[in-house]
Image (cartoon, rainbow, N blue to C red):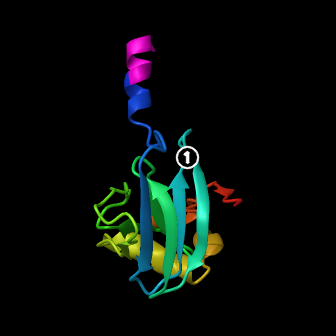
Amino acid sequence: MDQGNMAEAENRIVKSIHSDTSVRVEFINETQRPVDLFWIDFQGKLVRYKLGLKPSKNYHINTYETHPWIARDTRTGSSLLIKKDFIYYPKANDEDDEFQQIFISLPVFRLIDRCVDFLRSHGIRHQADNLSIPTLLVQDLKKNPFLPCQEYQP
């Protein structure tokens, strides 16, 4: 791969860029699932900031404009929406002292994703080969949905 293509590929990596403009965020879990919140650091690696944010609960954080965040279901590892997108980029507002309310919600799952999610939530992932279910479902069920990450150390 030549240098131009490498630079082009690197631009597609989701990562934090700088820490110039601070943003105060209140993540609110609108799902009926516990949620893990991850910040994507300057190398594009995940740092888990919150483990198991309970349904209807919130989490306050001071972050920055170019710092992307993602949310995953704690039990199944399924991707969740933050402010109606899978990757949330904070934006500064005029009220610097106010926390912006940012809602975590469920996406519309494809039927196969919903089936995998249901089976994972019931701890059946490791029994996939013993089930009488379609091969595609077995393959998806065997995939590890949990993301490698570091834990946030304040």
Number of marks: 1
The reply, left or right, for residue 105 in relation to residue 123 is left
Foreground of the two, 113 or 32: 32
31 or 132, which is in the foreground? 31
Residue topped by disc 1? 41
Secondary structure mostly seen in the magenta stretch: helix
Q: Could you tell me if residue 67 is visible in this image?
A: yes
The amino acid marked with disc number 1 is Asp
Q: Is residue 138 visible?
A: no
| Residue at image coords 50%, 62% | 62
Give the residue displayed 42% in from the left and 78% down from the top.
28
- Residue 47 image offset from top left, x and y in percent: 60, 55
Residue 152 among magenta residues: no
Quadrant of the frame with the N terminus: top left
User: Residue 102 location, x and y as percent?
Assistant: 36, 71
**Residue sitting at x 59%, y 78%:** 52
Residue closer to the observer: 104 or 80: 104
- Range drawn in magenta: 1-7
Percent position (x, y) of residue 85?
31, 61
**Kind of element beneath mark 1:** loop
Q: Is residue 4 magenta?
A: yes
The furthest residue to the top: 2
- Between 150 and 24, the one nearer to me in the picture: 24
Mark 1 neighbour class, 10 Å CA radius: few under 14, some 14 to 19, many 20 or more: some
State the quadrant of the C terminus. bottom right
Q: Where is residue 128 in the image (x, y as percent from the top left)?
A: 58, 71
Q: In this view, does 56 lie above or below 92?
A: below
x 58%, y 46%: residue:
45
